[in-house]
Every structure is written in structure tokens, then in C-alpha cells.
């Protein structure tokens, strides 16, 4: 994969121009490939034509300098970056700040124009590639960029496209053939420029190009529907490493971070719940409450300002001075006070089964009772009992509770209605175009919209960096799990003017509980039972759970529930696609023949045959070229290879060719070489190594003839793997 231009002067002018142009095109293709597939292109903006023009001009100057150095050329090479710095020196610090923001995990990934910075980047890439390709002869290093960009691009939202792949293909195929066809820097003979070699190079170029595009087409056909499974592998490995690290260092993941990838539960048991009676509804255990959403993360909600404000308040109303613990248990106190003994709470004990969990997991409508050896115990009411109080109790009897709740309601509306509408234009438009009134109608619309526009799955794929998670989830992928549903629902509630929060913890379904010998009911929650949901604030009542995530059992299908308001174009398109796929599957099933499977098998066979054919061709081509190189080696270098080959066969051990009786020993052990030929060979080797000039071509042929006789004698006695090594790797025979 090396490009040699030092021998251009030995060519004919016409051939020199053709091959110079071909090599320059390969060089520029690599430069354009880097600029075109640069991962940060997703997050930065710049004018393309000045950057690419700078890249071509600078690459051309560097390329011309390789052939002949001129003062003007040197001045231009130094002047271009200096000119860029002089013209844009005021903007460069700001551009660097934008770039740093794009590289940071917390950055928004958007900013000003980076044209000047990218022009300097293009100059740097041109210099680096020139050194790697022409100076060091290590053009293969670019594989460490091109392969990860093509294979891992979707992880960062940079899906490989035809232009980027072709640019890298042109570079790699062109440089490989050009480098392999060249004879070497230190050799000056023009063997490469013979007509037969040129024809082989041309055929090789066509062959490799054809093989590349065939393989590209087959790979796209076979993997286009399975790319997510391929990308799941590194994500799953990363998640396992992160989980192991957390267990070792007793740390937890960022609970407020909304995931961009798939969810891979490990089945680890984390919590144990024990209740007196089997619950009729899911039990939600909240652990983390998110208040402000920014950069794909929910900052933890903090109500301390409310309690500080109540202490500083000038009113003598006793409610303003109630402590935090009492206020957070106000709903439980209401049920206990208004129930008059008719409403009985249930006992719930929560036990940790893993040291990796931190914080408390608190059920709704509960009050902490005591700590046990294994965990902690709460007394709790159900949501149905809480709602029955408001339904069956006269309004005037609840007025005291609602008055006290109104103070907190004012704080909630100040704290939990913030939403960045500019970063969520489509979600904002959806809510604006479908106005709703009343908490019940708003909740119904949001839940139905989410269920109709997105389906539940633990493997939704990877959300690209730079994309807003709620928007991409609802309008692009239409697939996600609890974190995506809860985040989107919370933001939609805020867009409708309803205070909301994002909550994570665990959810226990009634079917998770099993009756124990002592009459209690026990549920064991695994990491797969971790859940996220939304809390909405209901005036006069407090926070209420709204779980917008469809049932996990609906993973393979989209919910049929929808409203007239949510019958948007996106829904119709999704339904049409599902219907088309269903019809196609039914037609294939009725046909009785799996034509797609047959086509894939045929393509696999063709791919294997092409791979074998390409490997055979390349091995044969390489071996033929190596043999020609060995045939033209000087006698002393040829002697070194002969000694290596003889040593593989176990002959002349301990000899290095400098002994006085070496010729006699050589003819004695290698029976095909006569004593006269042995002495003749040593004479030619000494003359080539220590003489004033080189031996003649006839004498060179004579030395090669003796080398060949020695090799043919040793080869049959080699082990099988050494025969392959000598013939197809070293290419000595």
C-alpha cells in the first residue's frame, strides 16, 4: 500500500503523466474521504467549497514538491496556512470554543461557522497523508480510520453512504495496486513499466474494483435489515463492562441520563418486595425524580426552595411552617384522617438484594415505619383509595387540604413547566396543532398519541448524537422503551401547561407476586424491572403517576389506540409501512417458497466463490511478482535467501558462508550442486559484495540457476507447513 514516485523519471513521458495523475487521484480521494466522513460534520457547520478547494490546492503543491522542489512551491506551501490565520485570526478562538463544545458530552453540538478551522484541518490532513503515503510508505494506516468510520458510523449517526465508501475504496485499491506493482525505492530498473506489467496492473485494478462493489452490494443486501443487531454487540459489551465497574467500585449509573441505545437487562436480582395481600395494581417505587430536562438528561428535582420560602414567609398560617417530612407525607395523612378507620393501609417491606443500589425506593401514598435487618418497611394506601376520598367526600371538608396544597401548587408551576421549545420544534408543533383542555383530556391525548406513533421495544436502535431524543423517538424511529416514553410524555405535559416530572425506579406488577408459606406475598425485581414514568401535578391533590409506556407484551406491535387529533401524516405512513410488510409476509407465506432465503443462500455461495477466487488471484499475483524480484536480486542477497532456505531443511547448520571449506560442505550436503558450481557461486557472491562493480547479467543468471537447484533439493524434504510458507509467503521457489 505504498506509492512510489521516485522512479517516475525512468518512464516515458506519456506513461509518467498517466501514472502521476492516477496516484494523485488516489491521494486526493483519501483526503476527500476524511473530510467527507469526518464524524463532527454532524455537529458543526462550514462552507464546503473553500475547504475542499484548499485541500486540492495544498495536496497538489505537496505532490509537485515530491518530484521537484521549487522556491515558489515552498513559499506557497508555507503561505496558505499563514494566509488563513491572518484572514481569520479573529474568528479562530470562537471556532475553537464551538469545536470544544461539540466534543464535550454536555455540549449542545451546534454553533457558529467553522470554515477557517476546517481549512486548517484540511491542510493538516494533506500533510499527514503525504508523509504516510510518500515518505513513510505506510498508506495502510488509513485503514484505522476508514474501517471504523464505515462500520461504526451509525453509532454516532453517521451512516456510511456510497460516496464516502467509494472515496476510500478508490484510495485503498489504487494505492495497493500502485504500491505492489512498483519494484521498490532502491531499485532503478524500469521493470514495472513493461507493457505486460501495465496490463496486469490494469486488469488487477478492474478485478479488485469489481470484487469490491460486488461485496459491497452483497453486504448491504445481507446486513441492511440486521445492522442494529451488529451494533448491539459493542453496546452490550460496553454495558457489561460498565455494570462490572459499578459493582466493583459500588457506583451507580447516571439515573437522570436518558439512554440513546438499547436496553440489555442482565437478569440480576436487585430488590425484594413483601406485602400482606396480593396487590391489584402495579406498585411504583420511586428513587429518582427529574425536574429540568437539558442535553438528554433530567436534573434532579429539588423542592428545598419551597421549604425555605415557607420558613421565610411572613404569614402566621401554621401550614407554612410544617416540616419537610410531614409535608411529603401529606397524602397519607389525609387518607388516615379522612378514612375514619374505614380505609386501611397495607404493609410493604422492601429489601435490597444488591449492594449496587443507592438511595431509598419509596412507594406512593406511603409513610415510613421502621428499619429491619434486611430492609425498610412502609405503610401505604392505594391510588384507588386516594381517589375515593375526593369522590365521596364533600368539597367543603377537603377545603383545608386544598388550601394548603395551593401553596405548593404555586411553587410547582414556577419550577416544573420549563421546556426548551426551540430544541423541540416538531413536538411543540404537535401540541400547538392539537389543543387540549383539562387534565383528563390532555392525559388521554398524550398517552394515545405516544401509543399510536411509537411502539415499545427494548431494542429501538441507537439514537444519533446531535439528535434530540424525544423528537427522534417520536418522529423518526417510532420505537423506544420506558425512558423515551416517560421523557416525551413529561415534556408534552409541560407544553400543555401541566407541571410534570420524570421519575425512575422500579415497578412491580401484580403477577410478579407469589404467595409464601406464612401467607405474605413476595416479588423479586430484577434489573429488567427498572422503570421510568411521569408524574403530573393535579391541583388540590398533588403528584399523580401517569405511565405512558405501553405494556412490554405489545413490543411486536403498535398500539391500536388513537384519537382523531393524533391522526397525523407520520401515523398514516407508519401504518402503511406495517400493512405493506404484513401483506408481503402473507404473500410469501401463501407462496410456500422462501424465495428470499433461496436468494440469500445463492448470494452467500457467490460471495464465498468470489472471496476464494479473489484470494487465489492475489496469492498468485503476489507470488509471481516476488519470484521476478528474487530472480533479479544481486548475488549476495540471493545467497542470503538460499542460506535461509537451506537452514529450513536442516542443512549446513552452524555455517554462515564465510568458512574456507564452505563450498566443499555445500556441494557435499546439497547433492544437486557440484563442487565446481559451489565454488563458482561463492566467487560470484564475493565479487558482488566486495568487488568494485556488479557482476554481469549472465553471471547473475548463473547464480540464480545454482540457487534454484539448491531450493529444488531442499523443498521436498520440508514439512508441509514449511512448504506453504516457502512457496506462498516467502515465495522463494
Image (cartoon, helix red, strand yellow):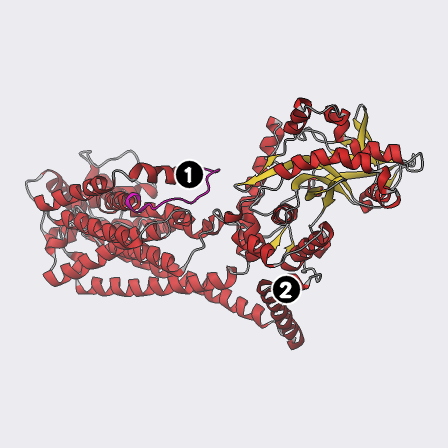
Residue at 29%, 62% (x, y): give it.
205
Q: Is residue 20 left or right of residue 433?
A: left
Tag 1 and tag 2, C-beta contact below 8 Å: no
Q: Which residues are magenta?
A: 104-117
Residue 720 in sight: no
Marks 1 and 2, how far apart at CA: 39 Å
Query: Which residue was labeled with disc 1?
Result: 101
x, y (%) of residue 294?
54, 40
Residue at 74%, 31% (x, y): give it.
353
Residue at 44%, 52% (x, y): give it.
158
Q: Secondary structure at mark 1?
A: helix
Q: Quadrant of residue 664?
A: top left
Q: Is residue 142 left or right of residue 708?
A: right
Residue at 61%, 67% (x, y): give it.
572
Disc 1 residue crowd, few under 14, some 14–19, many 20+, Cα 10 Å:
some
Query: Which residue was labeled with disc 2?
Result: 567
Q: Residue furthest front?
A: 315
x, y (%) of residue 455?
65, 56
User: Tag on residue 339?
Assistant: none
x, y (%) of residue 184?
20, 49
Name the mark nearer the viewer: 1 or 2.
2
x, y (%) of residue 186?
16, 45
Amino acid at each position: 500500500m505504498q506509492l512510489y514516485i521516485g522512479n517516475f523519471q525512468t518512464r516515458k513521458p506519456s506513461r509518467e503523466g498517466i501514472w502521476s495523475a492516477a496516484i494523485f487521484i488516489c491521494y486526493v480521494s483519501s483526503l476527500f474521504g476524511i473530510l467527507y466522513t469526518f464524524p463532527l460534520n454532524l455537529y458543526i457547520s462550514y462552507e464546503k467549497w473553500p475547504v475542499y478547494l484548499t485541500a486540492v490546492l495544498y495536496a497538489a503543491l505537496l505532490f509537485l514538491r515530491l518530484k521537484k522542489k521549487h522556491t515558489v512551491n515552498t513559499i506557497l506551501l508555507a503561505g496558505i496556512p499563514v494566509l488563513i490565520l491572518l484572514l481569520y485570526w479573529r474568528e479562530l478562538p470562537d471556532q475553537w470554543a464551538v469545536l470544544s463544545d461539540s466534543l464535550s458530552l454536555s455540549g449542545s453540538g451546534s454553533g457558529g461557522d467553522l470554515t477557517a478551522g476546517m481549512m486548517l484541518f484540511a491542510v493538516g490532513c494533506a500533510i499527514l497523508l503525504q508523509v504516510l503515503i510518500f515518505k513513510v510508505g505506510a498508506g495502510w494506516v488509513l485503514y484505522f480510520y476508514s474501517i471504523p468510520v464505515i462500520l461504526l458510523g451509525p453509532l454516532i449517526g453517521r451512516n456510511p453512504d456510497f460516496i464516502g465508501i467509494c472515496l476510500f475504496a478508490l484510495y485503498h485499491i489504487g494505492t495497493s495496486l500502485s504500491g505492489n506493482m512498483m519494484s521498490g525505492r532502491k531499485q532503478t530498473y524500469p521493470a514495472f513499466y513493461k507493457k505486460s506489467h501495465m496490463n496486469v496492473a490494469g486488469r488487477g485494478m478492474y478485478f479488485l474494483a469489481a470484487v469490491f462493489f460486488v461485496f459491497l452490494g452483497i453486504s448491504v443486501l445481507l446486513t441492511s435489515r440486521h445492522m442494529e443487531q451488529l451494533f448491539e454487540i459493542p453496546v452490550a459489551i460496553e454495558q457489561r463492562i460498565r455494570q462490572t465497574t459499578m459493582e466493583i467500585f459500588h457506583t451507580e449509573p447516571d439515573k437522570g441520563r436518558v439512554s440513546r441505545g438499547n436496553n440489555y437487562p442482565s437478569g440480576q436480582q436487585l430488590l425484594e418486595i413483601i406485602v400482606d395481600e396480593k396487590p391489584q395494581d402495579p406498585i411504583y417505587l420511586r428513587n429518582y425524580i427529574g425536574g429540568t430536562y437539558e442535553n438528554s438528561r433530567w436534573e434532579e428535582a429539588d423542592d428545598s426552595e419551597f421549604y425555605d420560602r415557607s420558613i421565610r414567609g411572613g404569614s402566621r398560617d401554621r401550614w407554612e411552617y410544617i416540616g419537610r417530612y410531614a409535608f411529603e407525607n401529606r397524602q397519607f395523612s389525609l387518607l388516615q384522617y379522612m378514612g375514619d378507620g374505614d380505609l386501611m393501609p397495607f404493609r410493604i417491606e422492601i429489601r435490597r438484594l444488591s449492594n449496587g443500589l443507592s438511595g431509598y425506593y419509596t412507594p406512593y401514598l406511603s409513610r415510613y415505619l421502621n428499619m429491619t435487618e434486611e430492609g425498610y418497611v412502609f405503610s401505604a394506601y392505594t391510588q384507588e383509595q386516594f381517589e375515593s376520598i375526593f369522590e365521596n367526600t364533600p368539597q367543603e371538608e377537603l377545603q383545608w387540604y386544598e388550601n394548603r396544597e395551593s401553596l405548593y401548587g404555586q411553587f410547582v408551576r414556577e419550577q416544573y413547566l420549563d421546556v426548551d421549545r426551540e430544541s423541540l420544534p416538531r413536538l411543540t408543533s404537535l401540541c400547538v396543532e392539537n389543543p387540549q383542555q383539562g387534565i383528563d383530556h390532555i392525559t388521554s391525548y398524550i398517552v394515545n398519541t405516544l401509543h399510536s406513533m411509537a411502539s415499545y421495544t427494548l431494542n429501538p436502535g441507537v439514537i444519533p448524537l446531535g439528535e434530540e431524543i424525544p423528537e427522534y423517538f417520536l418522529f423518526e424511529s417510532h420505537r423506544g422503551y420506558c425512558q423515551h416514553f416517560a421523557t416525551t410524555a413529561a415534556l408534552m405535559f409541560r407544553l400543555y401547561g401541566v407541571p410534570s416530572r420524570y421519575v425512575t425506579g422500579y415497578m412491580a406488577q401484580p403477577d410478579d407476586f407469589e404467595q409464601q408459606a406464612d401467607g405474605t406475598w413476595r416479588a423479586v425485581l430484577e434489573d429488567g424491572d427498572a422503570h421510568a414514568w411521569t408524574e403530573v401535578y393535579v391541583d388540590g391533590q398533588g403528584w399523580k403517576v401517569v405511565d405512558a409506556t405501553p405494556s412490554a407484551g405489545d413490543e411486536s406491535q403498535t398500539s391500536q389506540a388513537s384519537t382523531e387529533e393524533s391522526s397525523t401524516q407520520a401515523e398514516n405512513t407508519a401504518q402503511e409501512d406495517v400493512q405493506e410488510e404484513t401483506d408481503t409476509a402473507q404473500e410469501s407465506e401463501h407462496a410456500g417458497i422462501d424465495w428470499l432465503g433461496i436468494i440469500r443462500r445463492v448470494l452467500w455461495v457467490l460471495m464465498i466463490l468470489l472471496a476464494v477466487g479473489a484470494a487465489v488471484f492475489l496469492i498468485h499475483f503476489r507470488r509471481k511478482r516476488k519470484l521476478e524480484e528474487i530472480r533479479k536480486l544481486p548475488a549476495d542477497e540471493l545467497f542470503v535467501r538460499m542460506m535461509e532456505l537451506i537452514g529450513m531443511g536442516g542443512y549446513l547448520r552452524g555455517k554462515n558462508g564465510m568458512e574456507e571449506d564452505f563450498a566443499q560442505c555445500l556441494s557435499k550436503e546439497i547433492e544437486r550442486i557440484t563442487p565446481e558450481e559451489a565454488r563458482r557461486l561463492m566467487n560470484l557472491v564475493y565479487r558482488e559484495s566486495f568487488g568494485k562493480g556488479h557482476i554481469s547479467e549472465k553471471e547473475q543468471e548463473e547464480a540464480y540457476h545454482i540457487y534454484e537447484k539448491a531450493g529444488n533439493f531442499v523443498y521436498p524434504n520440508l514439512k508441509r507447513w514449511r512448504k506453504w510458507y516457502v512457496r506462498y509467503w516467502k515465495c522463494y521457489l
